[in-house]
Each structure stands twice: as C-alpha cells, then as structure tokens.
Amino acid sequence: MTDNADYDPRFLKLLSAFEVNSLQNDGGTIYGLWPDLTLAYFNKEWKRFAMLNGGEPQITSEWNLGRCVLEAMAQPLRPFFTDNYGRCLREGRPWEHLYECSSADLFRQLHMTTFPLGAAEGLLVVNSLRLETPHTTVACPPLDELYRNEHHIVAQCSHCRRVRRAKGIPTWDWVPAWVSNHPPNTSHGLCEPCIGFYYSPQHTNRAGFAKSFRTSANGPPASED
C-alpha cells in the first residue's frame, strides 16, 4: 500500500482475493464498509474525485475511517442503500446500481458494484465512470421567485440535482448555478423521473412524491402563477 492509503488493517484481511495495489491506484472511486456501513477503506481516487468536485477540505477533515457512509447521502436515498447493502451482505451476492453524479458542467453516469466480503464481514464498493459528457440541457437562471416555496425553501433532487419549481405542475429545471453552490435553505429530495429510472419499483409510489411531472427542455422558464 502507498502512503496515501486510508484503511483499517483488519479490513485488508477481507481483501485477500483482490489485488489491493490495483484497487488503490484504480481510476474509479473505491471504498470498503463494515457491516454497520462505516468506512473501513478508501482508495486514492476517493479524495481526488472529492477535490475535483468541491468536496475539500471537508472530505479530509470530516470523512475519515469509522464515518457512516449513509451520512453522505440525502435522507431520501438512505433507505434504498441501507436495504440493498444489507441484502448484499445477507445473500452473499454482488449488487449493481447505475446512478448519476453530475457537476455543473458535466453529465456523469456511474456504475456501482458492491461485493460482499467474507462471511457477511464487509463490503467493497467499486464505482466506475460509464458516461461523461457536457450538459445539453438548457440552463435555467437561479430565480428565487420561481423556485422558493412559501417557506422560502428550494427543493433540489439529490440525484440529478435539478430544482423544482415552487408552483404549478411539478417541473424540475437544470439550474447549474445552484449545483456549484447550494442556495441557503435547500431541501434535498428525489424527483419522480429519478425514482422511476434509477431506483427499484417499490420506491416509485412512496408517499410525498408527485404523481405527475414535467421536465423542462425548451429554455429558461417563465414565472408561473
């Protein structure tokens, strides 16, 4: 292992079937979890990816071994990952998941494979870039009067990071200025398209999500009554 490695020595014993140096130098973000979903290992790309996407200095100062990975996720995503990480451990079978992790400039889709280790003793999570391309969605301006609801809260999808208009039919717009810098009083949820496409069917009809939606594709929106 190199000096940049962050790992619990006990966890390395669970990686005996893997080439650990290859994991450490892999171009994808790789991390290991104990059964309670606390961090036991992460490779060099973990910190590099965070640095390139505005995650420093928090990733170094706050995300060390022993931190629960669920704390990095918006609340609506936690049950999905808790259930599937748990199933992976119980059944001893890898779990695969496709997800989005875009920046203000780039649309990125990643593929995650979670491997069970030992006798339900841990998990190895490997994230690989599947697609990266400049955004083609028309950018909308960050208008408080359009996106802040009656409680002055902005609702942003924790997955695709689009922002919901405060009035009318649920409509989610691409507002890159608020991807780079979250506005004050932002609430993270999930938009209906992301629930239906990225997550299992039992999550598509959860209470609190709109039954219908519209995705803007024809330029910046006009204010709605």
Image: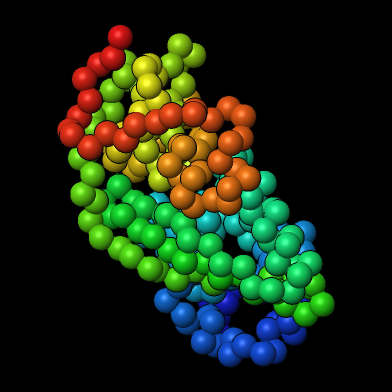
Residue drawn at the location 45% of the way across and 71% of the way down: 128
Percent across and percent down for residue 137 are 23, 44
Please say whether residue 101 is visible from this viewpoint. Answer: yes
Which color scheme does this rendered protein use? rainbow
Q: Position of residue 12 (x, y in %)?
A: 70, 82
Viewer-nearest residue: 72 or 66: 72
Question: Which of 101/219 is in front?
Answer: 219
Q: Quadrant of residue 142?
A: top left
Q: Which quarter of the image is occupied by the N terminus? A: bottom right
17 w.r.t. 51: above or below: below
Left-right relation of 94 to 25: right
Viewer can see residue 181: no
Query: Horizontally, is 90 left or right of 188 in the view?
Result: right
Point 52% across, 66% down: residue:
112
**Is 79 rendered above or below residue 192?**
below
Q: Quadrant of residue 212?
A: top left
Q: Name the residue located 43 percent from the left edge and 16 percent from the top edge.
A: 149
Task: State how many labels appear.
Answer: 0
Residue drawn 46% across the image and 50% down it: 197
